[in-house]
Amino acid sequence: MTSTTNPSGAPAIQAPKLSMWQVLVCGAAIVTLSMGIRHGFGLWLQPITQAQGWTRETFAFAIAVQNLSWGVFGIFAGMIADRFGAFRVIIAGAVLYALGLAGMALAATGLLFTLSAGVLIGAAQAGTTYAVIYGVIGRNISAEKRSWAMGVAAAAGSFGQFLMVPTEGFLISSLGWKEALLVLSAAVLLIVPLAFGLREKTTPGAAPVKREQTIVQALAEAFKYPSFQLLMAGYFVCGFQVVFIGVHMPSYLRDKSLPPEVASYALALIGLFNVFGTYAAGALGQRMPKKNILAGIYFGRALVIAIFIAAPLTPLSVYIFSAVMGTLWLSTVPPTNAAVAQIFGIQHLSMLSGFIFFSHQIGSFMGVWLGGYLYDRNGSYDIVWLLTIALGIFAGLVNLPVREAPIVRTPAPAVTGA
């Protein structure tokens, strides 16, 4: 237990931090469910569009809105979690997730589908994924283990992808696409009891935590700092690449006359190998510059995609691509968020991570929407594949100049509250 002094001079006892393993187990389980379910959305593209008579652009636009909604709501979810704790945010996210999945199943028009699959699920993901969970990790786990812990949480989300994609494929094939969504709507509510494990304790009557900066000061500092802008640019590319591949690759493989199970196995392999990639990226972030890890990941993605589209397409080539790409899939997440914590500290970590993630989601919007738009007009995904390569090279280059040293601030009186 530690004590601080409140403005009246009386000591305010702060509650002890959550245990590291409690944070990791509950946080990892939440990310597993949240990220695992969304990773399989590409499996619904053809069943839903064929059943409803919609174009691929209709489905892709809804998922694009989902990613944009996730980014927008993620900023505010991060602010609330930093100020009041993550517990309420996670509960709200779980409820919205259940409503959004049910809405996907019951939507009769493209507009209603976009509101449920897009707006509601995007808001739900903002409250149940990395920015909020990483804020809890940052506040409760020491800097010496922070990057590693973020890697563990990201690896859990990757395991969720490996676990949930074949599960979702099985549910679709055995129950039908609509019933499968309703089952997932009920299953995602398991996040609610897990949220209690991340309920950060407060002591009644304690003074508000003293902060070095207000929210406005923290944002002004970050957006003026070139390295923050470079991290945002790199994360834009990350979103473009992974969401385009995750949503459109199943249909791309079907268009090439590969059996439907190849897509399910491919997405599952991405999730499985992402477990190793994200854990390795988090562990390496404790030992080497995070900017070098990020640059290597983006350059590696560009090379892997180039080889994939140039080589003959077979189930084996798809599985090799998925395994290698999976290693690089979400491995950007731990070093990016750890770099933000290292540069700016942890007081506004969820909020700043939310802004960087908003850039990721703008990229996600562009990747998934352009995939559907250009396919409907050209009958192929070739242009978007080439864009993913060019953007990977760009992201690798912009991460190299990032400065990771903690920012030096002029001492100022502490502020209370925001």
Image: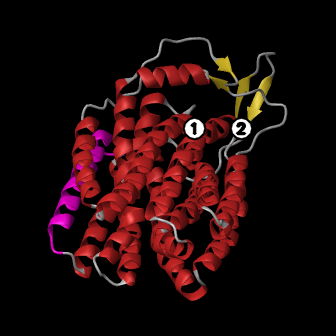
Q: Which label is found at residue 75?
A: 1
Q: Amino acid at mark 1?
A: Ile
Place of residue 158 in the rendered image (x, y in percent of width and height, measured from the top left): 45, 64
What are the residue bounds of the magenta stretch? Answer: 286-312
Residue 145 appears in the figure: yes
Q: Nearer the viewer, residue 87 or 305?
A: 305
Q: Amino acid at mark 2?
A: Phe
Mark 2–mark 1 contact, CB under 8 Å?
A: no
* In the displayed structure image, the side of residue 418 where residue 234 appears, left or right: left
Q: Which of the 4 image quadrants contains residue 175?
A: bottom right
For mark 1, does the 10 Å Cα neighbourhood hold few (<14), some (14 to 19), or many (20 or more) residues?
A: many
For the C terminus, which image quadrant?
A: top right
> Residue 221: x and y, percent?
47, 20
Nearest the eye: 9 or 68: 68
Based on the picture, tell me whether residue 123 belongs to the magenta stretch.
no
Given residues 202 and 191, the one toward you in this image is 191
User: In the rendered view, would you say 100 is above or below 67?
Assistant: below
Residue 93, placed above or below residue 233: below
Numbered disc 1: secondary structure? helix
What label sits on residue 84 in the rendered view?
Answer: 2
